[in-house]
Image: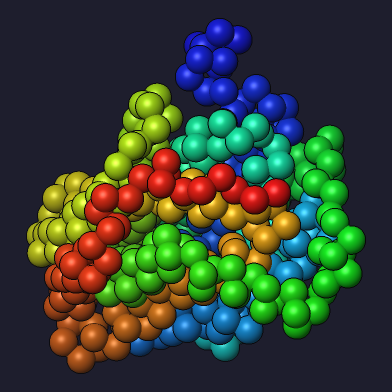
Amino acid sequence: MLTPSFIVERLPALQSSDFRNLWLGQIISAAGSQMQVAALHWQIYVLTGSPLALGGIGLVRILPIICFSLLGGVAADTFDRRRTLLITQSLMTLVALILGILALTGTTTLPALYICTALGAAAIAFDNPARQSLIPSLVPKEHLPNAYAISSTGFQVATIVGPVLAGLIIGRVGLAWAYIANAVSFLAVITALLFLRYRQEPRTAEQTASGFSWESLKEGIAFVRSTPILVATMTLDFWATFFSSAMALLPIFAKDILKVGAEGFGWLSACPAIGSLVSGITLTFLPPIRRQGLVLLWSVFLYGIATIGFGLSQSIWLAGFFLAATGATDTVSTVIRQTVRQTVTPDHLRGRMVSVSMLFFMGGPQLGELEAGLVAKWYGAVASVVSGGIACTVIAAGLALRWRWLPRFTVSDLPDKPS
């Protein structure tokens, strides 16, 4: 039971009403977004029957991220982050409504799905830097690791609920209603944003003067390049997820290999989030991880092992277990990466730091979906997933050897964050 003393002792980030309300709104909205992701993958495979078309959705998502994410970071550091989020959330609501209308009228085509996906990704390019940069403004610095653990747990709850609901809706009501439900879900986070009471940290005259400019963009890139732990975590993030992106091929496993249909597809899509939820809850109640570098490397290595296990699975139960393991290990690495990055980055650079990191943490899995689709087309889905898992383990071991300081890294090694 969430009594006041329990919140203070175990969930201190929830003492902030702004963080608490936004967190609840994001859980509802994220559940809707995960419904849409599952619905898109299922609809594309039903329309085309092509692994390459499934992989193409990753390319369509990442191109707008590449084009706009750096601008999104500058915008997050220049304009009011709450207002930026209100605009991006409204645009994503519109995209969901368009997808729903197309499905209801039977006019959906593959190019239309790709265009809508690209529009949504362009909004995310501005939404993600503003949202991640906002969290440190809502909680005290000492509560930041707890805030990210809680955020991860909430997101995983949404990622469990979303695909399961999508599978049920697709199987029993119709695919269009998964998109429409997502559009409605955005109202929760929009409402929370409207009632935020936080005030953005004041900018110095020099920071304000740089504004939305090329110099401002170069400042953010230079900061990331000059900070070894940011370079290391982003590189690890990209290559691990590039070679170990199995989610895009789930419709193939559900329909053709495991033969469990749309509802089974929904449950399989939720399994990584189930593992992530268990991992996130565990991290929420444990003391902060001390040897962050070593745990980060091990979590990525085990993520690759779990991916191999999934690719070789012949039953839905075994496949679900290994997918849950991928989610659990990924959550550990995510919480470590987010905490380290936000701790080392001053507030006036957070948006730009997140925008650069987006190229890695979104570019890896999205381009990885294209890579997975190509390998699946040539050698089959099982070979694609297993080879990707093997590559992930090799990457983790190789980077540990290249950056020998990384296994010994701890947050206490970081200098005090500049103001």
- The residue located at (39%, 32%) in the rendering is 288
Q: Is residue 217 left or right of residue 199?
A: left
For residue 80, say whether it is visible. Answer: yes
Q: Position of residue 153 (x, y in %)?
A: 46, 38
Q: Residue furthest bottom?
A: 378
Instruction: Say above or below: 390 vs 4.
Output: below
At x 47%, y 83%, the residue is 59
Q: Quadrant of residue 416?
A: top right
Q: Position of residue 363 (x, y in %)?
A: 46, 75
Percent x, y for residue 257? Answer: 17, 68
Give the residue furthest to the front.
415
Q: Residue at x 67, y 73 (%)?
A: 219
Judged left or right of residue 143, residue 363 is left
Q: At 26% across and 50% down in the image, what residue appears?
A: 408
Question: Looking at the image, which is closer to me, 42 or 137?
Answer: 137
Q: Image check: 407 left or right of 314? A: right
Could you say which quadrant of the image residue 305 lies in?
A: bottom left
Residues 350 and 97: in front is: 350
